[in-house]
Image: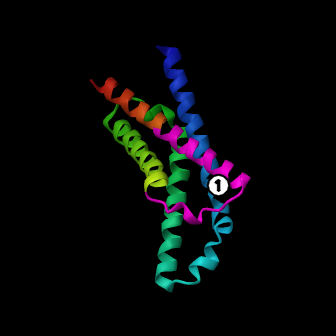
Amino acid sequence: MVDTWLNIKQIIRLAGLGQIVLALGSLAVPNVLRWRAELAKVQPLIKQMFWVYAAYIFVINLCFGLLSMFDSNDLENGSALATLVSGFIALYWISRVLIQFFYFDRTNFPIGGWRRAAEVLLVTAFVFFSLVYSWVCCINLQIAK
């Protein structure tokens, strides 16, 4: 049982590191997708709201990563809070995977080999995060029984 818990903690920390890297890497997205030029076409309020939403997503991803990196013990201790937080993080990333495939209009996605590779890497990370936190939530539910 000890080995399993050590592995779970390591996997949570790995997911945390991935989310921190994702958050920091997302700082390049506005340049890659030319947000400034695109947002110049919309009303100031819409532009401001867009930047606020982007900042919220950045902070959430960063905080999920920091929480996972530095407090993995409390994410998998079987408490109600651990269950709810891990479940919320799982739903967050599952939603992101679904948005990627069922909502985004892909007709204007950037083309090119490295951009395609980046998308594959991102989707792989989103699926990994979804699986890790779903697994942790299930473990928390079993511990709570």
Q: Position of residue 138 (x, y in %)?
A: 36, 30
The image shows residue 2, relative to residue 98, as above or below, that is above
Q: Residue at x 45, y 54 (%)?
A: 99
Front position in the image: 73 or 129: 129
Q: Residue at x 50, y 47 (%)?
A: 64
Quarter where residue 94 is shown: top left
Please indicate whether residue 140 sits to the left or right of residue 25 in the image: left
In the rendered structure, which segment of residues is drawn in magenta? 103-130
Residue highlighted by disc 1: 24
**Which residue type carries mark 1?**
Leu
Front position in the image: 134 or 62: 134
Q: Position of residue 57 (x, y in %)?
A: 50, 59
Q: Quadrant of the C terminus?
A: top left
The image shows residue 22, relative to residue 49, as above or below, that is above
- Give the structural element (helix, strand or loop) at label 1: helix
Magenta segment, prevailing SS (helix, strand or loop) = helix
